[in-house]
Image: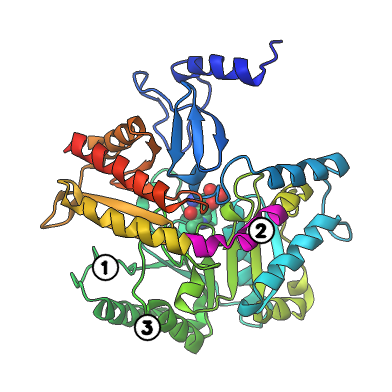
Amino acid sequence: MTVLTPDSAIRAAGDYKTATKNFWHPMSPSKQDPSQETLIVVSGEGNYVTDADGNRLLDGVGGLWNVNVGHNRAEVKDAIKAQLDQLAYYQSFDGVAHPRVYDLADRLVGMLAQEDAHRVLFGSNGSDAVETALKLSRQYWIAAGEPGRVRFLSLRNSYHGMHIGGTSVGGNAVYHYNHGPLLPGVELLDSPFLYRNPWNTEDPAELTDHLIRQLEERIEFLGGQTIAAFIAEPVQGAGGVIVPPEDYWPRVREVLDRHGILMISDEVVTGFGRTGNMLGSRGWGVKPDIMAFAKGISAGYIPLAATVFNRRVADAIENGPGFSNVIMHGYTYSGHPTAAAAALAVLDIVERDDLPGNAGLVGAVLQDELQALESHRYVGETRGKGLMAAIDLVADKGTRESVDPSSGIAHRIAAAAREEGVVVRPAGTKIILSPPLTLEADEAREMVRALDAALSRVD
Ligand code: PMP
């Protein structure tokens, strides 16, 4: 067996670019175009990654919206190593636990006191966090004596992970085509999308009025007593970084409260600072009943998810009659000690270095600079909040019709940006940016310069 030292790994890495692979890339054609070179990332340091050819690239994707503290942080690696030296893994089912998992639950409940957080269930990824939220919201209603509340409301353009529940409440049909039948009882509503909405309004207050009317009508038609929860991302991420109008979330929360419907906030991308607030929902001053976290909680160092329940939900379940107070849900990794140790170290950095604050400040520079790209032929709109942004690519600026996703324009722009030294993510008809929250203002400007050059080439 050949042992790869770091040096030989870098030299050998070039071979991976075109080598025959047994690996199916997720979210990709099952047969890869053999002429297309793969970006092989071999190392990372701070806000940069290095590819197989030794190119140092600014990481505009932050891994995949998750490496919020930057790459190769000594504090996180040390915490992981210390935990591995003690105990890599043990379970946490009925009557068994280990210190780090209790520490992390306490830490989260403390950080989320403002949301009246009360209990935490862990998992490994965002899809787990969402599945747990959906299932436990139904359990809440069984415990609360209204077992008829089983439906979910969700939004078009939403992304809630790839388990069958999250796929079913997801608002993008491409994830539905190959995997039906999906969960019944899911009702999709229009998303708070100013750039493209069925009413063709560009007035944020008017858009909210339309959306609230639609929400009220749908609840009235279905019967509030049949609806368990409304699930949404505070800012829609994968759907194209869609930032709702200022009054959207408070008005939605008011309607949900009037009908007793739970609010599940999918904070998988927005949690722990990305939008410039510790939580995405705090940017609108609303308090969810259930919060789903992953990604930024452990910044990609070890997979981890947490679903956090407020006192209303936790108390009802703990005091529910009969079997309704038993948590008959959980995973082998519902509290992985090494992942919990990583998360504690990550959250130390997030709080100590005020990464939400940095995301707000540097994000403002990024969003401002991005606007200048709207002069390019294919750029319909740039939008975002904090350190999450999208460039919406259009075939026609007047009608706002998207570019043909099969045209490969987004991939061509991303490839050109890479030649300019920046990794960005092509996603259908958009370019998505989600750099580490440690990004500096000059690096934000550099990202936009690279995109400007890349767009000029593709124009
Ligand atoms: N929810 C949201 C809002 C997400 O963006 C994602 C992943 N991008 C998920 C859930 C699913 O997370 P994972 O891929 O870790 O399962």
Q: Label 2: how many residues lie within 10 Å, few (<14), some (14-19) or many (20+)? A: many
Splitting the image into 4 quarters, where does residue 133 fall?
bottom right
Is 53 situated above or below 349? above
Q: Which residue is mark 2?
A: 347
Q: Is residue 459 left or right of residue 252?
A: left
Q: Residue at x 55, y 78 (%)?
A: 287
Is 167 situated above or below 140? above
Q: Residue at x 61, y 18 (%)?
A: 7
**Three-letter amino acid code at the position of disc 2:** Leu
Residue 264 rendering spot, x and y as whole percentages: 54, 70
For discs 1 and 3, the disc positioned in front in the rendered view: 1
Can residue 356 be found in the magenta stretch?
yes
Residue 107 rendering spot, x and y as whole percentages: 73, 66
Q: Which residue is mark 3?
A: 216
Can residue 229 be found in the magenta stretch?
no
Pick whichever, 221 or 4, lies toward us.
Answer: 4
Q: Which residue is mark 1?
A: 194
Badge 3 marks a residue whose secondary structure is: helix
Q: CA distance from mark 1 to mark 2?
A: 34 Å
Badge 1 marks a residue whose secondary structure is: loop
Q: Which of the two labelled residues, at mark 1 and mark 2, occupies the earlier sequence position?
A: 1
For discs 2 and 3, the disc positioned in front in the rendered view: 2
Q: Which of the two labelled residues, at mark 2 and mark 3, occupies the earlier sequence position?
A: 3
Q: CA distance from mark 1 to mark 3?
A: 20 Å
Pick whichever, 77 or 313, lies toward us.
Answer: 77
The boundaries of the magenta stretch are 343-358
